Image: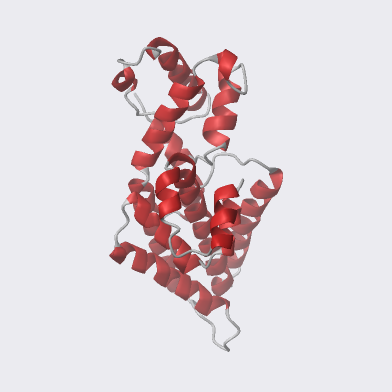
Amino acid sequence: MANTNDILTYLPNSYKTKDEEDYINFLWESYESNYNNEKYPFAFIAIHMLYMCFVYFEVWQIKENRKTDFEKAMIGVSKEFENKFLAATTPFAFVELGESNFIRFLKLIGCDNSQIGNYCLSVKSRNDAAHSNGRIFFNDRSIIDSKVDEILRFIDEIQTHSKPILTECLIKFLKENHNPDDREYIDDTDQIREILIHGNYMSQKDIEYLLTFDITQLVGDVNYLKIRCLFEAFKDNYLHDRGYNILQ
């Protein structure tokens, strides 16, 4: 079985509010408690809810960085949902749309119909475990372990597809936030934390990937030296101080 703790590295490094952080912690603790006490159906429900939170965070990054694509993807969505999603200030607003329908937003990052179908089947499995149907699903450790491995595989697939979005997000941030006199926070560290990390609900996996960005790609920009300084501040904060020692 894969290390279930790995799912935490795909979830946000930090949250905008304590309520959001408490909710994620509650789901994780629910998974651990139920798994350790052999209450496997409830463990599966908790881990699947974390998986869906991950999906919401991924789509949030699409919404924030490819707004035109996001708006086009809402064809067929009611005007009520469309307005709510466009005005949303948190990914948790996405919960109002049915999960199987919502997962289709992942086509915007290149997930194909086969992958989308598999992701939706996992929702059906969760629903089967959650409904009061007189049956106990996943009542064996080997079964729940297999289901958790499947969820982690899905998450990793989605994460891989999200890399172009992450790169676009970083470039946009660097170009728009290199001037301390023209942004929300004077200090680089504060601006990076609040606008880049919090604003995009970035995970450890997101940060690890962005630390490998080749800043020389932007050498032609008239503000390259300032952009590079901001990128170096990002690296200083998240490569050394926070333990993401993936670059030698």
Residue at image point 43% right, 34% down: 169
Can residue 183 be seen by looking at this rendering? yes
Res. 207 image quadrant: top left
The percent position of residue 228, horizontal first and vertical second, equals 41, 15
Position of 58 with respect to 160 (left or right) is right
Res. 38 image quadrant: bottom right
Coloring applied to the structure: secondary structure
Res. 185 image quadrant: top right
Outermost right residue: 19
Residue at image point 34% right, 16% down: 221
Outermost bottom residue: 134
Compared with 215, 6 (above or below) is below
Between residues 247 and 59, which one lies in front from this camera angle? Answer: 59
Position of 3 with respect to 12 (left or right) is left
Compared with 168, 58 (above or below) is below
Residue at image point 44% right, 50% down: 70
Between residues 9 and 207, which one lies in front from this camera angle? Answer: 207
Compared with 75, 221 (above or below) is above
The percent position of residue 29, horizontal first and vertical second, equals 63, 57
Compared with 48, 236 (above or below) is above
The percent position of residue 24, horizontal first and vertical second, equals 61, 52
Residue at image point 43% right, 17% down: 227
The percent position of residue 13, horizontal first and vertical second, equals 54, 39
Q: Quadrant of the N terminus?
A: bottom left
Can residue 239 be seen by looking at this rendering? no
